[in-house]
Amino acid sequence: MVYHTKKKEFAFWITNISNRNVTLRDLGLNIKKYSSVNLLSSHYHYTLEQIEKSIKEGSIFNKKNIIKIRKIEPEPTKKKIIEVSDQPKMSFKNRSNIIIEEIEYEELKISNEQYANEAADIFEEDNAPIIKR
């Protein structure tokens, strides 16, 4: 069950095909959902006997419906590249779509003298005695 890879090293690939993380208790390994693991890589220190025992009667055997043994090495996933640019991709308008109109009404135009006279009249009415004769 051990296969050779392009790099001339031993490989034993297994893939978790479920949408949940799977734990192989006898190997002390947690495999993330939809991911593949080479059990004979230098990262893990498993012997062939440990792996074969797990295949025959251990965790890999018990979880054979969600753990699949691969014959070939999976293709590496493509990295997502985020482009960074000084120039914005969206164009910004210098002007607004809103047009502001300044309307002048003749009846609202009051000279300073008129305003002063009206204010004086209002002041006199406010300060007038309450009792009328």
Image (cartoon, rainbow, N blue to C red):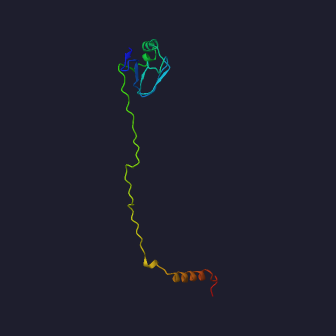
Report the number of discs.
0
Q: Which quadrant of the structure image shows residue 83?
A: top left
For the point 40% across and 46% down, the residue is 85
Q: Residue 29, percent across and down? A: 48, 21
34 or 42: nearer the eye? 42
For the point 40% across and 20% down, the residue is 13
If the image is split into quadrants, where does the N terminus sit? top left
- Residue 30, relative to residue 110: is it above or below? above
Q: Which quadrant of the structure image shows residue 3?
A: top left
Q: Which quadrant of the structure image shows residue 82?
A: top left
Q: Residue 92, percent across and down? A: 39, 55
- Residue 44, relative to residue 111: is it above or below? above
If the image is split into quadrants, where does the C terminus sit? bottom right
Q: Residue 38, percent across and down? A: 42, 21
62 or 27: nearer the eye? 27
- Residue 123, relative to residue 92: is it above or below? below
Residue 122 as seen in the image, left or right of residue 65: right
**Residue found at the far bottom of this picture:** 133
For the point 44% across and 79% down, the residue is 107
For the point 59% across and 81% down, the residue is 123
Q: Residue 40, percent across and down? A: 43, 18
